[in-house]
Amino acid sequence: MLKNIFRLTILLQFLAIALVVITPVISVNKLLYPTRIDSAFVNMQQLQFQKMKEATKSDTSAIFLYSPSQLQINFTELEFPMPDSIKLRGWMAIDTTKMISPLLLIIPDMLEGAIDYIPAMQEFSARGFNVGVINLRGQGNSDGEYYLPGQKSVDDLIRIIPELRALPYVNHVAILGSGSGAGIAVSILSDTSIADVLILQNPVTNFERFFKSHAQSEWPVSIPFLLPAIIRSYEKQTGIWVSDYKYDKMIENLMLPQMFVTANFNSKEQITETVAMYDASTYFKKQLYIETQSYLKRPGINNSKIYYDKISAFINSSLPYKSKKVSRKKLATR
């Protein structure tokens, strides 16, 4: 009897040690290597859907998008080489109704990719925008080992955005950041004024809260005990200090029009975070919009006409009246 108790005690101790060692590694890997939403991912989903359809003899249909060409979008491929030889890729839908149009640059969440925003490219370009979507490092079809929502991605986009703004058919830039992409967007604009309008979809007040939320979704029981180890492991591998990114403090100093959106969300906490960011903003022109019908749905075809109309209207009403390109041209001819 005593031997059995002793063996059980040893086994439990071993399991506890294994939990402490293994759980942080697995949790960090989920944050470092999120599922890449690319054409291979879409193809796998399509095959799984076909198998399910055949097994259940269902007559349901589904749309699987992997390229803007499927929706007859007039677009161009984007590829940006970084100084360390990493290449970031994406697409830009071109507005064909005007010679010069604003650019709406979309920065997806870590669990999304440019592919998710193909329907948004179609909808926003139909409303008079050039629409760019960029996969960051470790995301979609871009290069990179890790997904890095810190200074590295900020530096990458600060390098990319002026190149996009210099295109002859772009006159203004609006940025739409979703989830972790919203935090990156706030960080970009706290360092530079390279955009005219900011749209934050499902933002978080700080990166530590975002980090804990994603870690909790993987290991809800053990997280309180293991979270410090998970954070240390993540910081060591990425150089990103989790507690440094306080977006609700950064937003206080941003002097440009801001719209705060909750859409394609999966918890009430995301609404609370969006409202908290709206309240933290001190700029006079700001707007809050919550789209309840896209709850638990991925972005794109699940968003309503009102969603696209409201965001488009806010951007158009917030842009400078005159094109900056035209202003520079006038100054040059004096």
Image (spheres, helix red, strand yellow):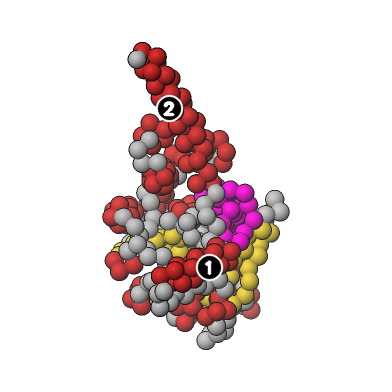
* Residue 156 shows in this picture: yes
Mark 1 vs mark 2, foreground winner is 1
Q: Amino acid at mark 2?
A: Ala
Residue 172 position in % (x across, y down): 51, 71
Where does residue 28 sit, x and y in percent of width and height?
A: 50, 41
- Magenta stretch: residue 154 in it? yes
Give the class, few, some or many, for how many residues have Cα within 10 Å of label 1's Cα (few <14, many ≥20): few
Whether label 1 touches label 2, CB < 8 Å:
no
Quarter of the picture containing the N terminus is top left
Q: Identify the residue shown where x is 57% and y is 38%.
A: 237
Q: Place residue 306 in its image quadrant.
A: bottom left
Residue farthest to the bottom, as pictured: 97
Q: Which residue is mark 2?
A: 16
Label annotation for residue 97 = none
Q: Residue at x 39, y 46 (%)?
A: 217
User: Residue 36, image x and y in percent?
Assistant: 55, 57
Q: Quadrant of the C terminus?
A: bottom right
Instruction: Please provide percent x and percent y for residue 287.
Output: 32, 65
- From the image, tell me which residue sits under label 1: 47
Between residue 189 and residue 269, name the one nearer to us: 269
Gap in Å between the C-alphas at discs 1 and 2? Answer: 39 Å
Q: Secondary structure at mark 1?
A: helix
The residue sitting at 40% across, 14% down in the picture is 3
Residue 208 in the figure: left or right of residue 94:
left
Can residue 327 be seen here? The reply is no
Quarter assignment of residue 182: bottom left
Q: First in sequence: mark 1 or mark 2?
A: 2
Q: Identify the amino acid type marked 1.
A: Leu
Tell me where the magenta segment starts and ends, as one range.
134-157
